[in-house]
Image: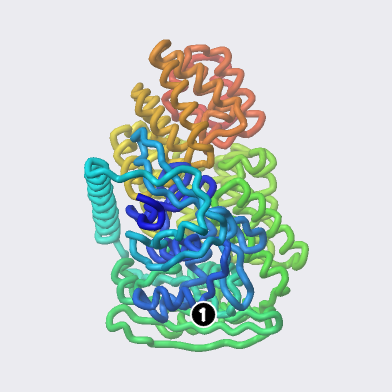
Amino acid sequence: MNSSSQSPHGLRFGIFEIDLDARELRKNGLSVKLQDQPFKILVAIVCRAGKVISRADLYSELSSHSTYDFKHGLNNAIQKIREVLDDSPENSRFIKTIPNHGYRFLPEVEFVYELPVLGINRTPVAEEGRSGAPIAELSLVPAGICGPEPTPNVLLTAPPPEITTAGTGTRKRWRLRLGVAVLLIIAGFSAYLYHVWNSRPLNGKLMLIVVPFLNISGDPGKEYVADGMTEEMITELSRLNPQRLGVIARTTSMRYKGTNKDTAQIMNERLVNYLLEGSVRHESNRVRVTAQLIQASDQAHIWARSYDGDPSDVLKMQKAVARAIADEIQITISKQVQEHLDAGSSVKPEAQLAYFRGLQDLALRTKDGQLAAIGHFKESIALDPYYAAAYAGLARAYSIAPVTRAAPPAESFRQAADAAAHALALDDTLADPHSYLGFAKAHWEFDWPGAEREFRKALDRDPNSSIAHIYFAHSYLTPMGKHDEAIAEIKRGLELDPLSPTIPSFLGRTYMVARHYDDALTQLKRVGDMDPNIAINHERLAQLYAHLRRYAEAIAEETKARVFSGESLQKAEAHRRVLMETFRSDGARGYWLKELEFANEDENPPEAYVTPFGKAIIYAELGEKGKALDWLETAYAERDLFMTELAVIEEFGSLHQEPRFQSLLRRTGLGK
C-alpha cells in the first residue's frame, strides 16, 4: 500500500502529535486537553502547513458545524491552541498571523501512518512531507482528515506500512478501548459537576456569571484586551454587594471562551440568576464596549447598552456597567461602593494594556508566565503610578511566584506585601490585596494574628472571592491545625470557581496534610480523571503514594508529573526506569536516596522535593534526623513556602522531641 492510497492516522510536529482517529492532541506522548472547536481548527491549519489558510476558508470549512458563534469564536480558538502549544502571536513558533488574511503553520509536519498507544511498545512508521506540501482535500472528519498525499510532493523516509487484517483488528480494539475510556471520563466529570452544583447552598444570594467578552476588533492580537475586560468586570461586580450578589470566579468564566454553548446552557449548568455578556472593539484612539444582561428564568434580555469613548475611559465604562446592573437587579450598594462608582476614574491606555497583558501571562500558571506577568505589571505601574489594579496584580504574581520557583520566597513575600499595601492605599475597597498581605505576614513574618486579621478583612469585603477562601485555608487554618475549617474554606472556594483546574487538586493536598489519606487519594485521583494534564496533581499523588509506601504507584505518577511539566518523554522514562530499578534492588531507602539525587537536578515538576523543606522530608524518611533539621534551618532562613506546615505534616513526627525542632516551632510561632 502506498501513500497515494492511504490517509494518515496522525500528524506530528516537534514534541506534539495529533491522533486523527482518537481526535486527540498529545505532547511528548501524553494527552493534552483541547476543546473540540480549537482541535478542528488546529487540524485544518496543520494540514496546510507552510501555506496561508484564510479566515474565510476556515469559516467555509466549518460552516456546517456553527455559524455566528464560530465566526466570533475563531480568535478564542486560536488563542487556546497557542496556549497548549506555548506559542504567542508576538513570537510565533507554530502559528503565524497573516494580517488581514489568515494564518500559516510554521513547523514541518510528518504524516504518521501508524500511531503508538501510550504504554504499548510499537514503533511508528512516518512519512515526512515538505512544509507546505499541497493537501488534496481538507475534510474535518477523523478518517482521511488531510486526504491522501500525492506521491510527487512527498519525501519518503520509509515506506508506509502494509496494514494486515490482524493489525487492523488490534487498532480497532485499541480505538474502542480508548473511546470507552473517554466516555467514562466525560461521564465522571459530568457527574462530579452535577454533584458540586446541585449540592451548592445559594444562601439566598443572587448569582451572576460574566461570560468572556468577545474581541470584535478584527485583530487576534487584541484578544488579551477582551479577556482583561472580562476579569475586571468580574472584580467590579463582585464588590457591589457581596452579601446579596455572588459572581462566579474568572477561571470558571473563561472556560466558556471559544465554546458553542448558548446562554441557556451556561446559565443552567452554573445555576445562576443572571448572565452578562458583551464585546469589546479596541482601537488606537477609540474603545466601544457593548454589554447585555440576561435573566435565567425566561432568557429575557433585560438590559443592554453600548459605551463609546477614549481608551482612558475604560474604567468609567466598567463602573457604568456595574451601576446599571445594580439598578436593574435591584441590589442595595453601600455608601463606600457608591463613592467608588462616583469617583472619576481613568487610567493611561498604555498602562491598562500592560496590565491586561500581565493578567494573560499570569493565567498560564507557569514560571515563564509569572515572570512575564511581573514585568508587565511593573511596566503598567511605571506608566501610571496611581493604577491600583496593577499593584494588586503585582502582589498576586509575587505571592504565587515561589510555587513555580519564579522568584525566591523571601523576596517574593516582601514584594507581594509592598505591592498589596500600595494597592490598598490607592483603593481601599479592594479585597484580594488583603489576602496577599495576609499571605506575606504568614509566610514571611510568621505573624499569625496579623495574617488572620488580613484574611478576615478580605473575606469580609468579598466573601465571594475564591482567592480569599483558598489563601485563608492554606496560609492560616492549615498551619494552625484547623483542618476541618481549612477543608470547608477550600470547598467554598470551589463552589465559587467550580471549573478551576487547581482548587480541586489543592483540596486533595489539604486532605493529605490533615491526614485524611483516603479522602486525599479519592480527590486527587478524581482530578486526574477529569483533567490528566495537571502536572502538580500528579506530583501530589506521587507524594501521597510514597507516604503510603506504595512506591510503584508513586513512581508512575511522578513520571506523568515530569512529562506534563515539560520534561521530554525520553528523559522522564529514564527517570522512571532508574527509580524503579533502585527501588527493586534497595527498597524504600533506595527510592528516597534516588529522590534526593533527582532533587538536585535543574528540571523537576512543581512541588517536587527540590526546596530545603522538601529535602528535609527526604532525610526524615531516611531516618537521618540531623540532616533533616539542617535543611529545616535552611528552610526557615529562606522562608520556604511550606515552612508554615512544620507542625502539621506527619513526616516530621520523629523530630518533634528534638530541641532544634522545638526551637523552630517557637521561632515560627507554631509551637503549642
Residue shown at 42%/30% (left/top)?
543
Determine the image quadrant of residue 526: top left
Residue 477 seen in the current view: no
Residue shown at 54%/68% (left/top)?
227
Q: What x and y, as percent, mark residue 80?
A: 49, 61
Position of 519 with respect to 48 (left or right) is left
Residue shown at 34%/24% (left/top)?
550
- Along the line of sight, which residue is nearer the eye, 53 or 147? 147
Residue shown at 51%/64% (left/top)?
134
In what element is the residue under mark 1?
strand
- Identify residue type, mark 1: Ser
- Along the line of sight, which residue is nearer the eye, 367 or 423? 367
Q: What x and y, as percent, mark residue 628?
A: 55, 18
Q: What x and y, as percent, mark residue 178?
A: 28, 47
Q: What x and y, as percent, mark residue 323?
A: 51, 81
Q: Mark 1 = which residue?
A: 279
Position of 484 with respect to 28 (left or right) is left
- Along the line of sight, which residue is nearer the eye, 134 or 597? 134
